[in-house]
Amino acid sequence: MTIAWGNQKEKWKLPEEPAGRSAPVPFELGAAVKYPVTKDGPDMSSQAADSGLQNKNISIELKWPFHRSTSGADFWVLHAMVQLEGSAGLSAPLAVNLSATVREVLPSLEPKDTEQPIINAVRKEVDRRQLEFVKSGKLVPLQFSSRHYDFKRNQWAFGKASDEEIRTFLERKIYWQTKLVGGDVWLGNETDAQYLQTTTDHLAQVANQIAGEGLIKLERRYATALPALMGRSEEFEAAMRAGLAELERKHAFERG
């Protein structure tokens, strides 16, 4: 089998609303259960779904806009809700606290400049098992601070993923989105690339390797799951169950 790399035959050129498909969703994440929605007005919100690196399906709702802290501290606050999909209503209400240091590197507090790194900061806390999902909980602060920004390289930094981790991430993303949403899966996602600390071109290269093994079919940057991938359902779902069990054990221990 010949695998096309780079931009051969425009395979990885960004699509311009291909016939029969909608244009790629800018912030489609992980095992997509919900797609982001952006609308004008003070109640602007966005939703996304994500499996991160620890195989937990979540949906994130960001409740725009940012507002200054009312406590007198020098930071800005954005409320958010993170739902743990398939968990009978478990969620984590958040107050994302944007530090003054990070505010200085942002062009604005509008979604176009802040949505991607905020989503990835939430993903990182989920992957680190720092968020507890409950049926009814109090607002929990999430520090969106300089620890997520590399000032030396002038870029967001959420941890460099290995090629093996990227491959696992993509396989899980394609499996879960196919199962829960259906249709083709967009892999040219800038938010995913930022979270994995790589490029969309490198995501495409790893996806091409997966395609070369007969697990998916690729057309430009869309992936279609093949039976060989979907047949690994027990592997993916066992990893999901193990991740949720580990999360519960951690928080049960912390509660005493």
Image (cartoon, rainbow, N blue to C red):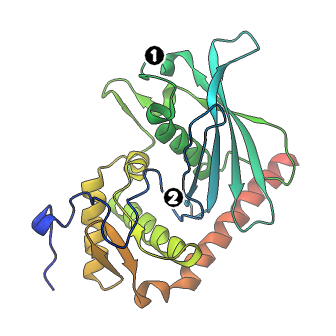
Name the image quarter holding residue 166: bottom left
Look at the picture and state if 210 lies above or below 72.
below
For numbered disc 2, what is the local secondary structure? Answer: loop
Look at the picture and state if 136 lies above or below 246.
above
For the N terminus, the image quarter is bottom left
Q: Tell me the residue that label 1 is attached to.
A: 104
Of residue 77 and residue 143, the one placed in the foreground of this image is 77
User: Alpha-carbon neighbours of circle 2 within 10 Å: few (<14), some, or many (≥20)?
Assistant: many
Q: What residue type is labelled 2?
A: Leu
Q: How far apart are marks 2 and 1 (CA)?
A: 29 Å
Of residue 207 and residue 81, the one placed in the foreground of this image is 81
Q: Tell me the residue that label 2 is attached to.
A: 53
Q: Residue at x 44, y 32 (%)?
A: 113
Residue 245 lies, in percent from the top left, at 73, 66
Look at the picture and state if 216 lies above or below 246.
below
Residue 248 lies, in percent from the top left, at 77, 59
For numbered disc 1, what is the local secondary structure? Answer: loop
Residue 209 lies, in percent from the top left, at 26, 73
Name the image quarter holding residue 194: top left
Q: What residue type is labelled 1?
A: Glu
The answer to whether residue 236 is left or right of residue 5 is right
Q: Which residue is drawn at 85% across and 45% down?
A: 137
Indicate which disc, 2 or 1, sits on the residue closer to the N terminus.
Answer: 2
